[in-house]
Amino acid sequence: MAQGLSVALPLTESTEDGPYAVHKDLIKVAEQNVKMVVLTSPGERVMSPDFGVGIKSYLFEPATSGLANRIKSRVASQISQYVPYVKVLNIAVNMVPDEGTLFLKIRYSIPSANTVSDLTIPVSS
């Protein structure tokens, strides 16, 4: 059985890793953890009622620079609190209000791995 750092989500069967596929490098683990923080709504995670950005709750608010700044601030503070080994370098918010969609582009580093990554998360209703 292969060793891994965390189970890969969504769960998929694996003949190589054991019953489920696993992430074997810190970059994939960080990407998954950042996605979880962004896509989880506060109150959704058991025993951690403050965990999560709740990004979908912002979809139908008026698309203003103030909203973009609130989203950036919330994302940065949640990542800082719940994924402390990741350092956020930049967050870009692209809103497409007519389609009820927004895109988050997060540039972050993992100092312990000496790496920089970009992650784009599309969010729609």
Image (cartoon, rainbow, N blue to C red):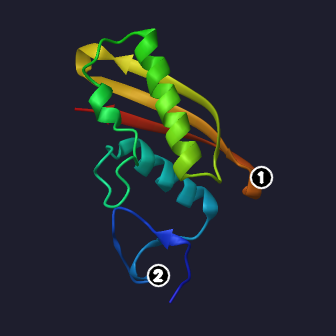
Camera-near label (2 vs 1) is 1
Between 74 and 35, the one lying in front of the other is 74
* Residue 85 in the image: above or below residue 6: above
Q: Which residue position holds label 2?
A: 17
Badge 2: residue crowd in 10 Å (few <14, some 14–19, many ≥20): some
Mark 1 Cα shell of 10 Å, populated few (<14), some (14-19), many (≥20) = few
- Residue at 49% x, 54% y: name it: 33
Separation of residues labelled 2 and 1 (CA atoms): 26 Å
Work out whether residue 119 or residue 36 is closer to the camera in this orientation and state it: 36
Q: How many marks?
A: 2
Residue 96, placed above or below residue 85: above
- Depth check, front residue: 64 or 122: 64
Q: Quadrant of residue 25?
A: bottom right
Above-or-below relation of 92 to 88: above
Q: Position of residue 75 (x, y in %)?
A: 49, 35
Q: Residue at x 38, y 35 (%)?
A: 122
Residue on which the image places disc 1: 114
Q: Amino acid at mark 1?
A: Asn
Amino acid at pointer 2: Asp
The C terminus sits in image quarter: top left
In-image side of 90 versus 46 (left or right): right
Of labels 2 and 1, earlier in sequence is 2
Q: At 42% across and 42% down in the image, what residue appears?
A: 38
- Where residue 118 sits in the image (x, y, percent)? 59, 39
**Where's residue 16, x and y in %?**
46, 82
Outermost residue, left side? 125
Image coordinates of residue 57 in percent, x first then y, are: 28, 31
